Image (spheres, rainbow, N blue to C red):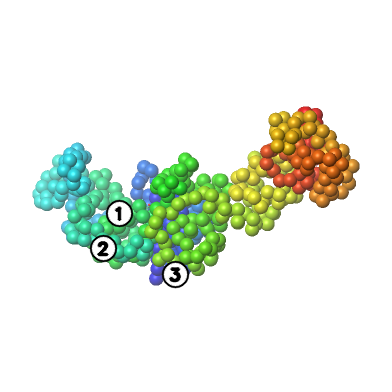
Amino acid sequence: MIKVRFPPSPTGPMHIGTARAMLFNFLFARGNNGKIVFRSEDTDRERSKVEYEEEILAGLKWLGLDFDEGPYRQSERGEIYEKHFEKLKASGKIYPCFCSAEELEAEREMQQKQKLPPRYSRKCCELKPEEIAQLEASGKNPVWRFRVEAEEIRFTDLVRGEIKELGKNISDFVIRKADKQFLYHFTVVVDDMEMEITHVIRGEDHLTNTSKHIMLFEALGAKVPTFAHLPLLLNKDRSKMSKRDESGKPATLERLKSEGYLPEAVVNFLALLGWNPGNEREFFTLTELVKEFKIEKVHKAGAVFDLERLDYCNSHYIRKLTAEDLAEKIKPFLDFEVSDEKKLIAAVKLIQERLKNLAEAKQQLRFFFTEIDYRLDLFPHTKMQVGLPEAKNALIAGLAALEGLEDWSEAAIQAALMEKVTQLGIKNGQLLWPIRVALTGEKFSPGVWEIARVLGKVETLKRLQQGIDKL
Ligand code: GLU
C-alpha cells in the first residue's frame, strides 16, 4: 500500500512550491490507490502559527486536494519522539555534545582557513559516562548529535536516479537542541516511520537532507522509504524563486487566489511545473491529471514559474464557465454596487473572451455600474484626425442617430450609427472613437454597440449628452 504525506511547516503562507509538492504527492497517491497523511511540522515554536496551518488547509481545499489521515501536529507528538530518542541513546547512535557556540565557531573558522568542509570535530564523541555526568552536574545542557558512521549512503531517487554521498562529508548532525527541542531531521524520520510512509516526494532543496534521513531510518530499524525530489522552481531569469517571485510579489498560493486565478487553472499550471505527459497537451482537469501523472516523467531541470502561462491557462478556464457562473465568481472582486444582476451577466459576456483573471474584471466592468469621470484629453485621436471640436460633433451626431431608435438591439444600434457615418462621409473611427470614450471613460473597452446595448438607451443618451456638455 502506497502512503505519502503533506508535511507543511506552518511558519508562513503556503508557498507555491509547497502547493506543487502537495499536488504531486496527491497525483501519485490517488493514481496508485494510495493514502495521504497531513502532518503539520510545527516544531519551530516561535515561527509556527495555527493560522498558517488553517490557511494551508483552506488552500488545499480550494485546490481540491484531500487527504485521508490527520492533521497530525508534531508539537503534540513529543512522547513519541522521546521514546525513539531513548532507543537511539541506548544504542549509542547518538551522543551529547557540550561544545559552546564559540568553540564551534572557532572550529569552523579553522576549517575555512584550511579550505576544509565545515564539519564537527567530534570532540565530544568519546566522552566517558563520568565526564558526561560531571558536565551535566555543572549545569550544562548538551545538544544531541547523530554519530555518522556510514562510509557511503546510496539511494535511487525516482526523479534523479542513483545518488550517493560519502559519510565523511556529513557532519555529526544535531537532532535535539540544548533546550530539549527535537529538530526537523529527527521528527520527520520518526513520523515517516510511525506513519508508515512509503514514498517521500518533496522539493529538491531537501535532497541534501536525504542521506541524514536514511541513516536515521536505519538507526531506528525502520524501512527506508522511496524518495523523489522535485525540480526547483525558477524565476524567468532562471534564478531560484524564493519567498517572492521576480516581480517582488509573494510566491504564495494566497496571492494567486487573490489575483483571481481559478483553482482549476492553478492546479493545471502547478502540474506542469516540472512534469508533462510527453506530448503537447496543455489542459488537464485534476481527475485527468490523476490518470496521466507518472512520477518517472518528472523532470530534473528546474521549472520556470511563468505567470504568462498561468494567465493563458486561466483564460482557458474562464472561457469555459457560463457567464452566470463567471459573474458569481467575479462579484467578490468588485468594489462597487451591482444591483442589476442581468446587466452584470450581460457585461461579463462582453469581457469574458479576453479576461485573464477575475481581479482585472473590476476595472473592465466599473464604467457599466458607476458614474464615469474622465479627462478631455482622452477624446483626441491623432491618427483618426479627431480633435476636441470633431469629438463634440461626433457625439452630437451619435445622439441624433440614437435618440429616436426604438429597437435597442446591437444590430439596430450598429445600423443607426453606420448610417450616420455614411451620411457624414467620415471614417467609422471618427464617429465611434469619441462615442466610446463618452460611454466608458476608458482607453480600452469592448465595442460601442455592445456597450450601448448593456448600458441601456437612457444611460447611453445621458452619457453622450454629458460628453457634449464637457466638450
Ligand atoms: N516541513 C518540510 C517543509 O515544509 C517538509 C520536508 C519534507 O517533505 O520532508 O519543507
Residue at the spot 60% in from the left edge and 48% down from the top edge: 357
Q: Circle 2 sits on which residue?
A: 154
Kindly state the secondary structure of the residue where label 3 is placed: loop
Kindly state the secondary structure of the residue where label 1 is placed: helix
Image quarter where the N terminus lies is: bottom left
x%, y% of residue 42? 38, 49
Residue at the spot 46% in from the left edge and 59% down from the top edge: 23
Residue 72 visible in this rendered orientation of the protein: no
Q: Is mark 2 within 8 Å of ligand 1?
A: no
Task: Work out whether mark 1 precedes mark 3 in sequence or the reverse, and give the earlier one.
Answer: 3
Tell me if residue 120 comes above or below residue 226 in the rendering: above
Mark 2: give few (<14), some (14-19) or many (20+) Cα within 10 Å. few
Q: Circle 1 sits on which residue?
A: 208
Asked whether the beta carbons under mark 1 and mark 2 sit within 8 Å of each other, the answer is no
Kindly state the secondary structure of the residue where label 2 is placed: strand
Q: In the drawing, does residue 348 fall left or right of residue 172?
A: right
**Tag of residue 286:** none
Asked whether the beta carbons under mark 1 and mark 3 sit within 8 Å of each other, the answer is no
Q: Circle 3 sits on which residue?
A: 32
Spatial distance from mark 3 to mark 2, Cα to Cα? 26 Å
* Residue in front for this viewpoint, 54 or 406: 406
Residue at the spot 87% in from the left edge and 38% down from the top edge: 400
Task: Work out whether mark 3 precedes mark 2 in sequence or the reverse, and give the earlier one.
Answer: 3
Amino acid bearing label 1: Thr
Amino acid bearing label 3: Asn
